[in-house]
């Protein structure tokens, strides 16, 4: 068994800035945690191969140095090894997963949390379509997933990941067609959706700068479930309006936006395939059925001892009927103490 941590580094994280500043970052990391071994990723999902080999060699603590994609790809391995602990060092463009667990977007502060070494078990989301991947913060399907898949083939010259993703999201928000689908949450009656626009399931609240599920980290942790949000019956400029309003979370109560909760969600397309993705990695491109399910106590994660979860709306926004989403609703934000 190896006592030193093994760090997997994505040099392309944060639009390549991690690789450019690697020597300085490695020096700072050693000042905080002492000796460690590391390896740089060289291709897509290389984290999986490196993590599996590190575990075979006896390492018990792995550290993801990069963004959400780096951490999630490593998580795909760690979920199968309950004896392994995963640490997150913020070094990517967005780091949504890190923020969900109050890990600061600053190298030194995230290293301080790692050194403190407080570990808790957290759930995962098993996402099944053409492939099975795990999500540890959020998964989505529809035009945003189509944009994530397109990022592998379009605009390869663009180095700034956030700008590229948001450009493609706005492109496919207009281009991707609505899909007739049947949605089933847990053991509830199936819901027929004539025009599914987009779908999200998450423990967290933000994705790539969009405040998709306000208050969900607190509610999901309390209820041991997933936050779910669907957009339906939206076309053209209404989709653009929804995206713009979702940046600060003001899409709550918008006509065609439905919030719900559950542990398992199945979406069966009655038309074209519904794309599904986890942190930029597509897990469904051709299949007509996607299954998303919460898995409790899936991963050992190093997190701060003290964390605060902000509840911005009353939980009732997640318990309205699907029929109510065909009308505009007014919800008041909770006042801060």
Image (cartoon, rainbow, N blue to C red):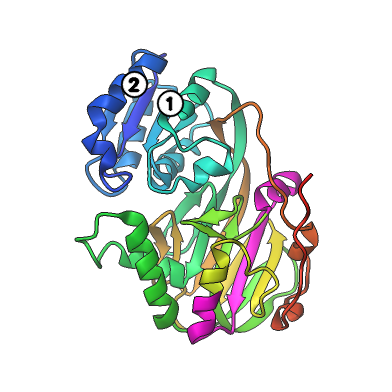
Percent across and percent down for residue 109 are: 48, 27
Q: Is residue 13 magenta?
A: no
Residue at image position (42%, 81%) is: 174
Residue 222, image x, y percentages: 75, 45
The residue to which callout 2 is attached is: 28
Dot 2 or dot 1: first in sequence order is 2
* Residue 228 point in image, percent of width and height: 64, 62
Query: Mark number for residue 326?
Result: none
Mark pair 2, 1: CA separation: 8 Å
Any part of residue 156 in sight = yes
Quick check: 21 left or right of 205?
left
In this view, 66 is above or below 118:
below
Report the residue marked by disc 1.
108
Q: Please tell me which residue lies in front, 65 or 292.
A: 65
Quadrant housing residue 261: bottom right
Q: Is residue 269 visible?
A: no
Q: Quadrant of the N terminus?
A: top left
User: Which structural element holds mark 2?
Assistant: helix
Q: Is residue 227 in the magenta section?
A: yes
Magenta residue span = 215-241
- For the residue carrying disc 2, how many other residues have a C-alpha within 10 Å: few (<14), some (14-19), or many (20+)? some
User: Horizontally, is 64 left or right of 267 in the view?
Assistant: left
Q: CB of mark 2 within 8 Å of CB of mark 1? A: yes
- The percent coordinates of residue 189 (x first, y second) are 74, 74
Residue positioned 33% across, 32% down in the render: 8
């Amino acid at each position: 068994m190896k006592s030193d941590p093994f760090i997997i580094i994505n040099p392309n994280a944060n639009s390549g800035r991690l690789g450019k500043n690697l020597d300085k970052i490695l020096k700072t990391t050693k000042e905080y945690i002492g000796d460690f071994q590391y390896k740089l990723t060289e291709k897509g999902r290389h984290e999986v191969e490196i993590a599996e080999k590190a575990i075979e060699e006896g390492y018990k603590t792995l550290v993801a140095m990069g963004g959400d994609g780096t951490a999630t790809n490593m998580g795909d391995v760690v979920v199968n090894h309950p004896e392994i602990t995963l640490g997150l060092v913020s070094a990517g463009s967005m780091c949504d997963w890190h923020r969900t667990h109050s890990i600061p977007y600053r190298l030194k502060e995230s290293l301080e949390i790692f050194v403190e070494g407080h570990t808790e078990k957290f759930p995962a989301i098993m996402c099944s379509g053409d492939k099975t991947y795990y999500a540890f913060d959020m998964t989505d399907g529809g035009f945003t997933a189509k944009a994530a898949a397109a990022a592998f083939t379009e605009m390869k010259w663009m180095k700034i990941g956030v700008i590229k993703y948001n450009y493609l999201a706005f492109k496919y928000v207009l281009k991707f067609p609505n899909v007739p689908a049947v949605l089933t949450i847990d053991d509830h009656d199936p819901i027929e959706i004539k025009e599914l626009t987009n779908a999200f399931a998450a423990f967290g609240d933000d994705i790539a700068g969009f405040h998709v599920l306000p208050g969900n980290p607190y509610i999901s942790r309390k209820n041991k479930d997933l936050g779910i949000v669907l957009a339906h019956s939206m076309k053209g400029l209404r989709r653009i309006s929804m995206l713009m309003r979702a940046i600060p979370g003001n899409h709550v109560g918008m006509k065609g936006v439905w919030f719900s909760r559950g542990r398992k969600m199945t979406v069966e397309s009655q038309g074209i395939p519904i794309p599904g993705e986890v942190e930029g990695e597509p897990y469904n491109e051709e299949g007509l059925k996607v299954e998303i399910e919460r898995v409790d106590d899936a991963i050992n994660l190093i997190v701060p001892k003290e964390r605060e979860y902000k509840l911005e709306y009353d939980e009732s926004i997640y318990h309205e009927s699907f029929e109510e989403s065909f009308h505009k609703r007014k919800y008041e934000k909770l006042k801060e103490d």
